[in-house]
């Protein structure tokens, strides 16, 4: 696993540990604060093993924790938006107006700033090669007047302050979501402890796949946002904005610059369920035997004025006025913004966020052969639509099917008693009034069907916000952390469960609780009826299943091979915790265009790959 969200880095469970910080032993708390401080460029590691602050003072671990702990806490998770456009000066904008000129208007302007089609009534006189004088006759004149619009939403789940993924490699004006993609996928490879080149070379190149995208595309200035604004803003469109805006571009970037893969690729876009849609593609490829290794994920960076305003006008976001009304406040403080997202409590809307999350999937035989770390297993992802709807954004019935199927699979694999006593729900938990009622009713109905009396529910959006297509990726990363540490994050903004929540058979809690889970249900309810539920089972349960399937000798051999992998992974994590990130970005390396290939009837040989591509295909249709 790899990535980054408002809580920090995914690898090493750093982001997860930030969400349960106070429940950790002192040593792990300090380690988490130190790593985040380095990530946020508050300190840098020096050769002596200590740390250096921006003024050059040398600090030890205890000094860093004491000095920067509160700053790290205040500048991670959901908080006041730090983008200056959302600040006191307001968001730059234009207002259409019509001037009624009583007399003629004379002004000077650069020649290149004149409209392409100068109005016939304008008189233009050349002053020099660069400047002209324009005389506009009396009458009506349509203009755009620049203004600053006060942001009506000022909270979001932003990446930790000071961390900029685009500075870690030669980004060349990449949209933020794609720079996050490069970091997230590199983090995933580093955490795996595997040598990607060696892994790739032992496989048919077509046995590898990448399924990654996002729910909206790249809508900041470097992507489609800048392209769509170009005519109105007067800015020039660039040659990169159009191609880099596509929603499947995270997959394209992984293939071209991180993995060098020639296998299957693509992206499934399903609003807030997009991560699970891509996970399902990878799972089905591996189950069918078509692929042996698949990287899946999402990368969403939607904290832009236009996207925020779009969701606000839908009534979906927790805007400032709604938050004030919710708590009867006249002024919002930083602590109020940090509590903006309140799943299953009295709430007023979701909090937008940015995140990138990636998983590396393998078939079980290959995982054992390579000595891979096994963080868990995903045996099923279920997707169903809502059917007929009044509003495209309103919830419907599909989520009842997806969760019920996931629980049925878990019951069949692990046993009914395990599901009742050792499973929990990772809720979509958006913090909208509608979601708290409808999702809890889904949970309640499934719990009743399976005899579950007290089903633990956690909702990581309370910490990191709603990253749109990446939301289930944030939930998945948190679930893997819970498996590793045996602690479920509480819903820390949950002062009281709302009256309209179906809570009789659900267990809500504010503070982290110890819980040894064998299964977690990753739930997503997306706009348009894009429902998905993924079942993820713990490493311990996975190992028991693998032993049953492959035998104890195979498991013992795997554990021996895993030692090398774990050592490489620990070395990567130590380097990353010091603030040094090994980002893979291979631009222009090993480029092939066709003449370099060699082909026989049954195989295609690609320079740079040890194994050929098998051209044998399955034909289930018969022969003439």
Image (spheres, rainbow, N blue to C red):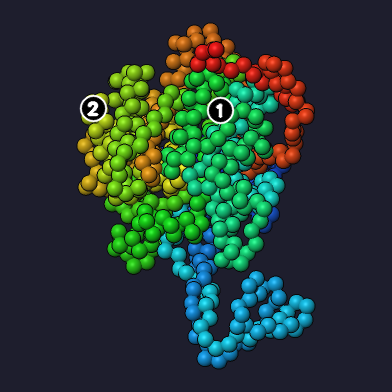
Task: Confirm or deny contact between disc 2 and disc 1 (CB under 8 A).
Answer: no
Which quadrant holds the N terminus? top right
Q: In this rendering, is residue 574 above or below 310?
A: above
Compared across the picture, whether 319 is left or right of 260 comes to left
Residue placed farthest to the bottom in the image?
A: 103
First in residue order: circle 2 vs circle 1: 1
Front-most of residues 159 and 584: 584
Residue 352 rendering spot, x and y as whole percentages: 44, 51
Instruction: Write down the residue under mark 1.
Output: 294
Q: Gap between marks 2 and 1, in whole Å?
A: 34 Å
Mark linked to residue 449:
2
Q: Residue at x 66, y 37 (%)?
A: 256
Q: Residue at x 51, y 13 (%)?
A: 622
Query: Quick one: SS at disc 2?
Result: helix
Residue 199 rendering spot, x and y as whole percentages: 65, 23
Residue 287 rendering spot, x and y as whole percentages: 49, 20
Compared across the picture, whether 125 is left or right of 210 comes to right
Residue 330 rendering spot, x and y as whole percentages: 34, 67
Query: Quick one: SS at disc 1?
Result: strand
Q: Residue at x 41, y 45 (%)?
A: 461
Around disc 1, counting alpha carbons within 10 Å, would you say few (fewer than 14), some (14 to 19), or many (20 or more)? many
Is residue 26 among the parts visible in the rendering?
Answer: no
């Amino acid at each position: 696993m790899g990535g980054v969200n408002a809580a920090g880095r995914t690898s090493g469970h750093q982001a997860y540990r930030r969400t349960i910080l106070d429940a950790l032993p002192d040593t792990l708390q300090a380690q988490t604060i130190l790593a985040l401080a380095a990530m946020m460029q508050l300190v840098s590691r020096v050769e002596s093993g200590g740390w250096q602050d921006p003024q050059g003072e040398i600090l030890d671990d205890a000094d860093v924790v004491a000095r920067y702990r509160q700053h790290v806490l205040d500048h991670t998770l959901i908080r006041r938006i730090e983008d200056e456009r959302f600040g006191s000066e307001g968001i730059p904008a234009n207002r259409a107006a019509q001037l009624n000129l009583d007399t003629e208007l004379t002004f000077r302007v650069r020649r290149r700033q004149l409209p392409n089609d100068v109005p016939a009534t304008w008189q233009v006189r050349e002053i020099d090669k660069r400047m002209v004088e324009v005389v506009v006759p009396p009458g009506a004149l349509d203009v755009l007047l620049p203004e600053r619009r006060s942001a009506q939403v000022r909270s979001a789940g932003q990446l930790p302050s000071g961390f900029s993924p685009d500075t870690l490699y030669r980004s060349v004006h990449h949209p933020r979501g794609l720079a996050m993609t490069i970091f997230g996928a590199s983090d995933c490879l580093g955490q795996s402890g595997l040598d990607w080149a060696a892994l790739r070379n032992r496989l048919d190149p077509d046995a590898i796949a990448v399924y990654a995208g996002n729910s909206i595309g790249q809508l900041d200035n470097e992507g489609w946002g800048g392209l769509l604004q170009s005519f109105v803003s007067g800015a020039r469109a660039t040659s990169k904005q159009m191609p880099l805006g596509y929603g499947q571009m995270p997959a394209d970037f992984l293939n071209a610059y991180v993995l060098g893969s020639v296998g299957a690729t693509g992206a499934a876009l399903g609003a807030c369920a997009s991560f699970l849609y891509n996970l399902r593609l990878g799972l089905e490829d591996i189950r069918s035997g078509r692929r042996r290794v698949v990287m899946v994920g999402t990368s969403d960076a939607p904290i832009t004025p236009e996207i925020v305003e779009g969701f606000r006008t839908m009534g979906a976001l927790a805007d400032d006025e709604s938050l004030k009304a919710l708590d009867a406040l006249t002024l919002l403080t930083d602590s109020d913004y940090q509590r903006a997202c309140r799943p299953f409590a009295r709430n007023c809307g979701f909090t937008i966020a940015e995140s990138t999350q990636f998983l590396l999937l393998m078939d079980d035989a290959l995982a054992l052969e390579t000595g891979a770390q096994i963080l868990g297993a995903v045996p099923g992802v279920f997707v169903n639509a809502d059917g007929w709807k009044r509003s495209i954004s309103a919830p419907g019935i599909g989520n009842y099917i997806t969760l019920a199927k996931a629980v049925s699979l878990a019951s069949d694999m692990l046993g009914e008693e395990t599901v009742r006593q050792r499973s929990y729900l990772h809720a979509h938990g958006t913090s909208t009034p509608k979601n708290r009622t409808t999702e809890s009713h889904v949970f309640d109905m499934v719990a009743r069907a399976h005899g579950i009396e007290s089903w633990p529910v956690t909702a990581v959006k309370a910490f990191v916000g709603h990253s749109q297509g990446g939301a289930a990726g944030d939930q998945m990363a948190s679930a893997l952390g819970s498996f590793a540490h045996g602690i479920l994050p509480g819903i820390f903004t949950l002062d009281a469960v709302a009256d309209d929540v179906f809570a009789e058979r659900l267990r809500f809690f504010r503070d982290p609780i110890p819980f040894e889970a064998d299964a977690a249900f990753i739930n997503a309810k997306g706009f348009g009826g894009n429902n998905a539920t993924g079942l993820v089972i713990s490493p311990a349960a996975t190992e028991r299943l693998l032993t049953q399937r492959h035998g104890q000798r195979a498991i013992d051999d795997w554990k021996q091979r895993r030692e090398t992998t774990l050592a490489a992974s620990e070395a990567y994590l130590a380097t990353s915790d010091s603030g040094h990130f090994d980002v893979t970005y291979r631009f222009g390396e090993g480029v092939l265009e066709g003449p370099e290939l060699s082909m026989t009837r049954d195989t295609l040989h690609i320079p740079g790959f040890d194994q050929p591509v098998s051209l044998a295909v399955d034909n289930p249709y018969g022969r003439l």
